[in-house]
Structure formats: C-alpha cells, structure tokens
Amino acid sequence: MPKKISILTTSEDSIANFCKDNSYPTFHAKQIKEWIFKKYAVSFDEMTNLPSAFRTLLDEHYYIHDCSIEKIDEDKNNTKKLLISLYDNKKIESVILSKNERTTFCLSSQVGCRFKCSFCATGSMGFGRNMSADEILAQFLLMRSITKKVTSIVFMGMGEPLDNTKHLFKAIELINSFKGFNLGIRHITISTAGEIVGIKQLIDRGIDSRLSVSLHSLKDDVRDKLMPINKKYPLDDLIKMLKKYSQTGKRMITFEWVLIDSVNDSVNDAYRLVNLKKEFPFKVNVISLNETPFAKNLKAPSKDKVIRFKSILHDNGIAVIERYKQGQSISAGCGQLVVKE
Ligand code: SAH
C-alpha cells in the first residue's frame, strides 16, 4: 500500500483526479474540502454525505491529521494546554486562551527551538525538527475541533516561526484563504526572536499578518546574553530590517518585552525604547517574566517597576499593553512550554 498523504495540503484538483481515477464523481473533492475546512472534520467517517466505500478508500490513501492529542490540561480560566504527539512520536504543546469573547490559539511551529533564549523553557529542549505545513494545519484543526470558535492565532508556542518559513507560510496561506479556514490575515500574528532573513521574506512576499518582535533589550551586551540570536543578528541589523519592514506600509510592529528584574526593567531601558520611536512607529507588549526552573537566576520585577516602565512608554506616546497573564498554573504561559522526552 502506498504511503498515506496529507489531504489538508492536497489541492482540490488532485483530489478530484483521485475521485475520477476511482470512478467517483469529482464534486466529492469540494465536499471533502468543505468537511475539513468549514466543518472541522477530523476523520473521514464524519463525512456522511460521501459513500461509505469511498470514505474507506480515502482513508487508505490520505490522512487528515497524522498526529493526536495526548493530553489536555485546563485551568480555572478555561485556558487549555494540549500535548500533541506527532507521527514520529515527537511532542509539541499548543495553548487555547479564552478571555471574554476572544479565543486565541497559541500555535507551535517547531519541535523544540534552536535559539535558546535564556528565559524560555522551550530552548532547554534543544531543537527537534521543523513542523511541516500539514502538521501546523492539523494542530489548528485539532484545536478547532475541541473549541467552538477562534478569533485569532499567534505563533508564540514552541519554536521560531521564521526559522521555518517554508512550512509556516504554506500553513498561514491555508488558514487564511477563503477556501481554507478563512481566518482574516490581521488575526494572525507571527512572533520572532529577530530572524532577519525571515522578516525579509515577509516583506518580499507581501505577507500581511501581524508581526511581533521579541526585543527584550536595546543593549547588545544584554541581548546577547538573553537571546543568543543577537550574536548572529545584532540590534543594528535587526532595527534596519524592521525599519524597512515598516516602510513597506505593513501593519505596525509590536515589540514584546519580557520584564526581568534588574536586567531590562530600568528607566534607561524604557528611554531606549522611547528613543527608537524616531526610526519607525511601534507598539509594546510588556509581560513580567514567567519564572521557570530552567533559569533560576532570572526573576520577575516588582509591580512598581512594571508600572514605572509602562508609564515612561505611555507618557512618551508609545502604545503599551501589559500582556494578561494566563495559564501559569498549568505551565501554559509564555515561555513555559516544554516537553521532555
Ligand atoms: N520564537 C518566537 C516565538 C516563541 S516565544 C519569539 O521569540 O518570539 C513567544 C513569546 O513568549 C516571546 O515574546 C517570548 O519572548 C515570550 N517568552 C518567552 N519566555 C518567556 C517567559 N519566561 N516569560 C514571559 N514571556 C516569555
């Protein structure tokens, strides 16, 4: 028997050919795509308007998802953390965040991460591998199958999305497209540690999702220690690329700033950000560090320091939001995702 292939990333035309080759009407191709992308079917059995023998045939040739939810942790605020096992038994985590009317999916794009930011638990896993486009889509589909709605997605789970652009862009195209999951591009956020080559690709390909950049410091010596990627792409180069990105008329960049006590929470740190306003407009999301056992020396600052940092930005005309803390009790907060083999 041939190796099964992903139906999520197979075009409607190829599925129509498959129907024809097996003497079934080609309109089934459209029905199959609708079952998956509009009704979030996770198995061929659910496709009740297809002949049963055809469903069996489909199941022999294709898979909808080649991964499974192994565990769901839930906190009292309805945050759900999913442990997903991939075809090769590698594991990733994904988080569903609900607040008021909004439901955000926090998606992973890689197994582990190669960038080893000192404050992030995922880095301690090392790098496993890239997730394929169909795995990223299957992750979305599995999340969608247990949650009635989704208002936005953020690639802030495991991995560096811009280190896996080939699969990321393909997945985003199918999450966004009218015939796909049809989620508006402005509801899709890519978060990067500062992968300059990937940012350039966003410019060159005209991808209009939102861009968050995990900045965390505007001093190279501090950023080198927090985020080793800074040694490869120092701040000057990153800022130059972001300026270019801004000038192409893209949506306003958001900087992520994880406040770490006595590392990047000073008055001067805040003013360095204010100074950057001369280059291009941006917003800032601050979040006080989610402490992890992987970086015992790094602590969250006091509330007063967080307020001081935010006030300086705000008083100098920068839109600043403090990221709502959610999921800490089940280790589903930013930087807490980790799976140990
Ligand atoms: N590699 C991407 C996406 C994954 S991290 C990136 O670096 O942006 C997603 C967000 O969580 C980033 O803004 C990151 O800086 C933040 N984060 C990581 N560890 C954290 C921690 N311990 N506490 C709070 N936020 C953290």
Image: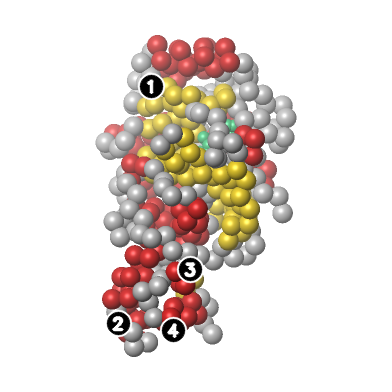
Location of residue 59 in the rendering, given as x and y in whole percent from the top left corner: 48, 77
Q: Amino acid at mark 2?
A: Pro
* Chain-order first, disc 2 or disc 1: 2
Q: 312 above or below 239?
A: above
Q: Badges 4 and 2: C-beta atoms under 8 Å apart?
A: no
Q: Residue at x 35, y 20 (%)?
A: 278
**Could you tell me how far apart the alpha carbons at marks 3 and 1 are, in whole angstroms?**
44 Å
Question: What is the secondary structure assignment of the residue under circle 1?
Answer: loop
Residue density around tag 4, few if under 14, some if 14–19, many if 20 or more, within 10 Å:
few
* Chain-order first, disc 3 or disc 4: 3
Q: Which residue is mark 3?
A: 43
Q: Residue at x 62, y 65 (%)?
A: 88
Quarter, ligand 1: top right
Looking at the image, residue 104 sits to the left or right of residue 15; the answer is right
**Could you tell me how far apart the alpha carbons at marks 1 and 4 are, in whole angstroms?**
58 Å
Q: Amino acid at mark 1?
A: Ala
Q: Badges 1 and 4: C-beta atoms under 8 Å apart?
A: no
Location of residue 21 in the rendering, given as x and y in whole percent from the top left corner: 35, 86
Question: What is the secondary structure assignment of the residue under circle 2?
Answer: loop
**Res. 299 image quadrant:** top right
Q: Amino acid at mark 4?
A: Ala
Q: Which residue is mark 2?
A: 25
Location of residue 214 in the rendering, given as x and y in whole percent from the top left corner: 50, 33
Q: Quadrant of the N terminus?
A: bottom right
Which mark is nearer the camera, 2 or 1?
2
- Residue closest to the eye, 324 or 217: 324
Which mark is nearer the camera, 4 or 2?
4
Residue 53, disc: 4
